[in-house]
Image: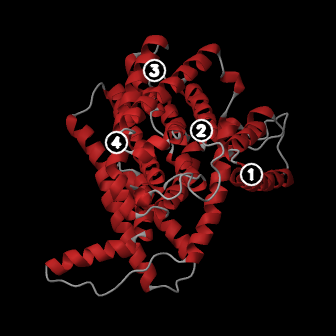
């Protein structure tokens, strides 16, 4: 329900006006960020707080219930955008680094948060581990579009985009496994192995196959009307299919976009391998055209603006007890403490990562995935998890403020250190 300040229904004209003002403010916040480096994230989240907790123009509980749907919709658009902006060669070059950063970062954060929540927060061990898992992932929906707007070397942009996508996926898998243990008292090793394989392996294969086949279809029927909307419909089905088979919808969508943007080098490698077996590939696929990319950029802007405003509307000052504030602050310190230690070790082998340490340290915001995962155990009736949403939402806001501070002054088009030699 859309409400007024005293709970009365908000007129349709007022709702339409609010939507228009949100888009206008979103536009000027992006311009401000590009010109001055002042983070648009802070402005948009603050706008959401004004619309929700302060003036009560929207009903928070209704928005909370819609978080799963809105989060999935935003992820589909944003992860497609992330895939379309990546270069295959640089992805392959940075994949090992990003994978290690994801696994080590998630494991370290998960371990220390579990200790903190169990020993200091007073949670039982298993609930503490579930909340720790939800809090241990960076938000791909926030990181991926932000990296396109700030001046960082391409290798850093690629590595952090991959880390965010893999981190989201890993958190979902681990959280679901822990919830299954809490409900059933344990799970089989096969379930654990299959969950990990389907989340990563199946998502990569299905996303690649779907992306390649659809790009071939767009090339063959190049005059097809409404190609973007049809592509979006394909992505909705792909996302749903991967979630049904316990894969990762966001990761599959990102791979789909990566294939669409890099189909020419992919086919070049495929031809080379087919020649080895005495086969030939006669047709050639084309990457997406400028009209497709232009329209997608417009949609991505719209989704991103409403995404951050949406996060602000979920915040509730009435839930901020001393325990919630203290434990959330301690959790944020643990998150960045682990990340700082990890980056200190990794920076010794990669000079460009050492130079961009501040950006890499602070580019670990929590988002809607964390909120949804934190609310999930309570929906299954798991004891001791009813307050998870309060901690998660406060951590989300705090980490986004840290992100805004860390990227302050980096708005613009050119990398801070110029070109990074092809991502080396």
Compute the Cα span from label 3 to label 2.
Answer: 37 Å
Residue under the image location 65 percent in, 51 percent down: 411
Dot 1 and dot 4 residues touching (CB under 8 Å) = no
- Left or right of residue 300, residue 222 in this image: left
Indicate which disc residue 383 carries.
3
Indicate which disc residue 349 carries.
4
Q: Position of residue 299 (x, y in %)?
A: 63, 63
Compute the Cα span from label 4 to label 3.
Answer: 45 Å
Mark 2 surroundings: few (<14), some (14-19) or many (≥20) residues within 10 A? some
Numbered disc 2: secondary structure:
helix
What is the image's colouring? secondary structure
Numbered disc 1: secondary structure:
helix
Q: Label 1 belongs to which residue?
A: 32
Compute the Cα span from label 2 to label 4.
Answer: 23 Å
Pair 2/4: label in front? 4
Q: Label 2 belongs to which residue?
A: 406
Pair 1/4: label in front? 4
Residue under the image location 38 percent in, 21 percent down: 126
Pair 3/2: label in front? 2
Q: Earlier in the sequence, mark 2 or mark 4?
A: 4
Q: Position of residue 74 (x, y in %)?
A: 57, 53
Instruction: Place residue 424 in its image quadrant.
Output: bottom left
Compute the Cα span from label 1 to label 4.
Answer: 36 Å
């Amino acid at each position: 329900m859309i409400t007024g300040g005293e709970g009365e229904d908000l007129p349709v004209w007022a709702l339409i006006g609010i939507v228009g003002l949100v888009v206008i403010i979103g536009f000027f916040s992006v311009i401000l960020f590009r010109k001055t480096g002042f983070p648009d994230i802070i402005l948009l989240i603050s706008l959401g707080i004004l619309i929700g907790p302060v003036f009560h123009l929207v009903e928070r509980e209704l928005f909370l219930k819609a978080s799963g749907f809105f989060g999935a919709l935003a992820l589909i658009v944003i992860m497609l955008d992330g895939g379309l902006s990546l270069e295959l060669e640089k992805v392959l070059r940075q994949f090992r680094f990003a994978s290690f950063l994801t696994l080590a970062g998630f494991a370290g954060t998960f371990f220390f948060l579990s200790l903190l929540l169990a020993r200091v927060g007073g949670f039982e061990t298993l609930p503490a581990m579930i909340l720790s898992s939800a809090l241990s992932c960076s938000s791909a929906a926030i990181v991926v579009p932000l990296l396109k707007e700030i001046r960082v070397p391409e290798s850093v942009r690629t590595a952090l985009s991959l880390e965010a996508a893999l981190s989201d996926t890993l958190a979902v898998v681990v959280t679901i496994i822990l919830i299954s243990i809490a409900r059933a008292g344990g799970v089989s090793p096969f379930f654990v192995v299959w969950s990990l394989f389907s989340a990563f392996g199946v998502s990569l294969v299905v996303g690649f196959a779907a992306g390649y086949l659809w790009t071939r279809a767009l090339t063959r029927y190049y005059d097809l009307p409404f190609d973007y909307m049809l592509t979006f419909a394909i992505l909705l089905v792909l996302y749903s299919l991967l979630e049904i088979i316990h894969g990762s919808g966001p990761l599959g969508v990102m791979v789909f976009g990566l294939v669409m943007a890099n189909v020419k080098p992919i086919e070049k490698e495929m031809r080379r391998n087919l020649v080895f077996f005495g086969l030939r590939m006669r047709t050639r696929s084309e990457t997406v055209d400028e009209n497709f990319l232009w329209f997608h950029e417009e949609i991505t802007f719209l989704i991103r603006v409403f995404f951050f405003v949406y996060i602000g509307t979920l915040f509730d000052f009435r839930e901020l007890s001393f325990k919630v504030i203290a434990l959330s602050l301690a959790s944020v310190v643990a998150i960045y403490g682990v990340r700082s230690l990890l980056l200190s070790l990794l920076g010794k082998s990669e000079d460009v990562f050492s130079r961009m340490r501040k950006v890499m340290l602070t580019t670990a915001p929590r988002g809607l995935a964390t909120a949804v995962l934190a609310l999930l155990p309570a929906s299954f009736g798991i004891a001791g998890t009813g307050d998870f949403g309060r901690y998660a939402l406060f951590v989300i806001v705090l980490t986004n403020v840290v992100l805004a501070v860390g990227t302050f002054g980096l708005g613009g088009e050119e990398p801070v250190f110029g070109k990074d030699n092809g991502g080396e």
